[in-house]
Image (tube, helix red, strand yellow):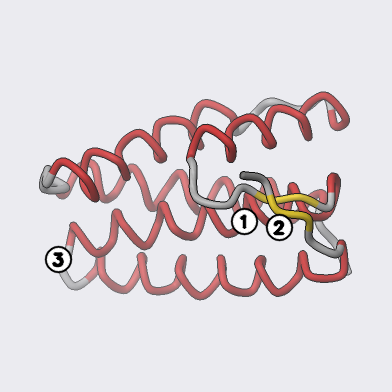
Amino acid sequence: MVRKVRKSDAMAYLRQAEEFLGSAQDNLQKGRFNAAGFDATQSMINANDALTIYFLERRASTDHREAMKLHIDVIKTTKDDAQRDALKRSLDMRSEVGYLGKAVSKKDAGRLVRYAVSFMRWVKKYVKE
């Protein structure tokens, strides 16, 4: 179920996203690929929450499909779908790792961290204090 959130809370979600991104980068550097992939995707989830809160004053509660639907609703406003596929791929991999027990390879961890860096840069174009 989608949750209603005040627009003023968007920056708190963005700060959380930055913290998870830093953790993902550190974990990648230290060879902790599962943690790097998980943190990179969590960074994207929090950044997407910041984005949807900023534009819609709503965020997904527990379902990745909700997160994608809200992301697409924002795209309808911004006309910018540059990061949609990266978010979808990251959420799909998060499900595989978190729920199916799949290990994250070095290559996949690196890819997820790159996605998160790019996604964060993209979100910051739109979400401002």
Q: Sequence order check: which comes first, mark 3 or mark 1?
A: 3
Residue occupying image coordinates x 24% and y 68%: 29
Give the answer, above or below, for where 19 lies relative to 57: below
Q: Quick one: SS at disc 1?
A: helix
> Residue at 41% across / 52% down in the picture?
41
Is residue 35 rendered to the left or right of residue 64?
A: left
- Residue hosting label 3: 31
Q: What element carries label 3?
A: loop
Task: Indicate whether 107 appears above or below 49.
Answer: above
Amino acid type, label 3: Gly
Which residue, given by chain and number where applicable, does mark 2 sit on?
Answer: 50
Residue contact at pointers 1 and 2, CB within 8 angstroms: yes
Is the N terminus in the top left, top right, bottom left or bottom right quadrant? top right
Residue 19 horizontal/vertical position (percent): 51, 75
| Separation of marks 3 and 1 at Cα, in angstroms | 24 Å
The residue tagged 1 is 47
Q: Is residue 97 above or below residue 21?
A: above
